[in-house]
Amino acid sequence: MNKTKYKKDTIKQRDIAELINNNVESLEDELIRFTQKIIKIPTENPPGQNYPECAKAIGEKMREIGCSVEYVEVPESLLPKLAPNGEGLPRVSVIGRYKGEKFRPLLHFSGHFDVVPAGSDWTLDPYEGIVKNGNIYGRGTSDQKSGIAAQIFAIYALKKAGLQLEGTILSSATPDEETGGNAGLGYLVNQGYISDKNTDYCVITECLDVDKICLGHRGTFWFEIETKGIQSHGSMPFEGVNAIDKMIKLINEIKYQTKTKLKKQSKYLIMPFECRKSTLTVTMINAGTKVNVVPNSCKAEFDWRLIPEHSVLEAEKTIISICEGLKKSDPEFNCKINIIQKIEPILVPRNTTVVKAFLESVEIFLRKPVLFSISPGSDDQRFVVKNGNIQQCIVYGPGSLVMAHKSDEYVPIEDLKNAVKVMALAAIKLLGVKK
């Protein structure tokens, strides 16, 4: 009896998977065109250009496939706090609701449409969405406008296949993830759009590789230190105190005192392998006004990424202790610390319903074992897990993690289609389908 029922369910699942597969394949050209359309809108952050235009393009597509659409704009009065480097430009999110027979269970897909500045060394136009050798090229193809396209076309494929869901899908596209996300998904969560009171499952559609399910991310501690000196003529440096020399001393001390922490390897599957240790990087240095002037100020910014075994509080205490120690040992050492961002590591259980649904769906379409991973960088998952109190939240999307922020960024079209198929089938597993 049980064996017969399992066989029937397997056949039904196989039929639904084939139906989804066929409909996604039939939507390939339209999927590519839509992905190109939103890539062509340069939503560089900072400062946050063209957000309303991009949100509108996404909202129009969601409305076209049968979603009700709502735009959520951050009040102007909150912009200085939530988007301090945004030059007062508008912060707009768009949410599409694809109603099932019932409001619950509810699955929320979310991706960000802001991108880092294109930068240099491109061999192709970063904002043309050029298709070449089976890939779509452009800034944001991998990180992560392809994820937004995939979540929308997963709904589209279900509709085209005539599969009516019992539960409901929400699909949101948000700004500002690249500068912290407080005016994007963070704002939606804080406004109650996503919480354990109205959402059962959440999937952040970041580019964490189409054959992997991401359960969390490393912590982030960004800080700036300014060393102070005394300005003097370059021909008489002994009359001053060189702030650059003090910064060199500080950087060397930070490297020495964090050496043991940075050697510890995490037990978790952080991808790529090299990121299974915490990393501490000096990313910006600014000092001096003229070649013959000893500088009285030197600023450096640091990016410390923390494995789940470490905490941001521990990292912050370490840096403060190093600075205080140098002040005691060197009467001429003077510095000021500015904390830019603190994000604790995130890790959700692997034995949840949402993980099981995506595991099964990935295996069906990719026909290979699925790997779990932890992201080397932070993302919007933390808002859902910490602020929204939702543990059934994973990161899954098309695009290769190692392509993020690079020149000639691209997403393979096959990865994009496979992500659509996986999301559509997983939605059925989580929400149910009307017979």
Image (cartoon, rainbow, N blue to C red):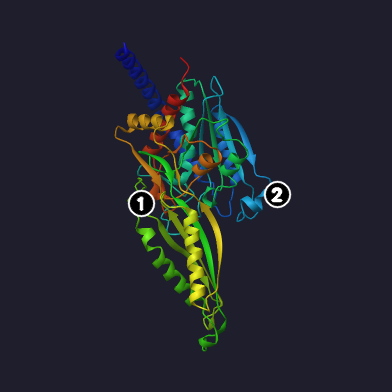
Residue 152 in view (yes/no):
yes
Quadrant in which residue 102 is drawn: top right
Q: Residue at x 32, y 33 (%)?
A: 366
The N terminus - image quarter: top left
Residue 118 in view (yes/no):
no
Q: Is residue 218 above or below residue 355?
A: below
Measuring from the top left, give residue 288's x and y in whole percent.
54, 76
Q: What's the distance in space between the residues labelled 2 and 1, CA to CA? A: 41 Å
Measuring from the top left, give residue 355's x and y in whole percent.
40, 33
Measuring from the top left, give residue 322's x and y in whole percent.
47, 67
Identify the disc placed on residue 77: 2
Residue receiving disc 1: 276
- Which amino acid type is shown beneath numbered disc 1? Arg
Q: Earlier in the sequence, mark 2 or mark 1?
A: 2
Q: What element carries label 2?
A: helix
Q: Which residue is drawn at 51% across and 87% down?
A: 238
Q: Is mark 1 on a helix, strand or loop?
A: helix
- Mark 2 vs mark 1: give the one in front: 1
Measuring from the top left, give residue 164's x and y in whole percent.
49, 20
Q: Residue at x 54, y 39 (%)?
A: 173
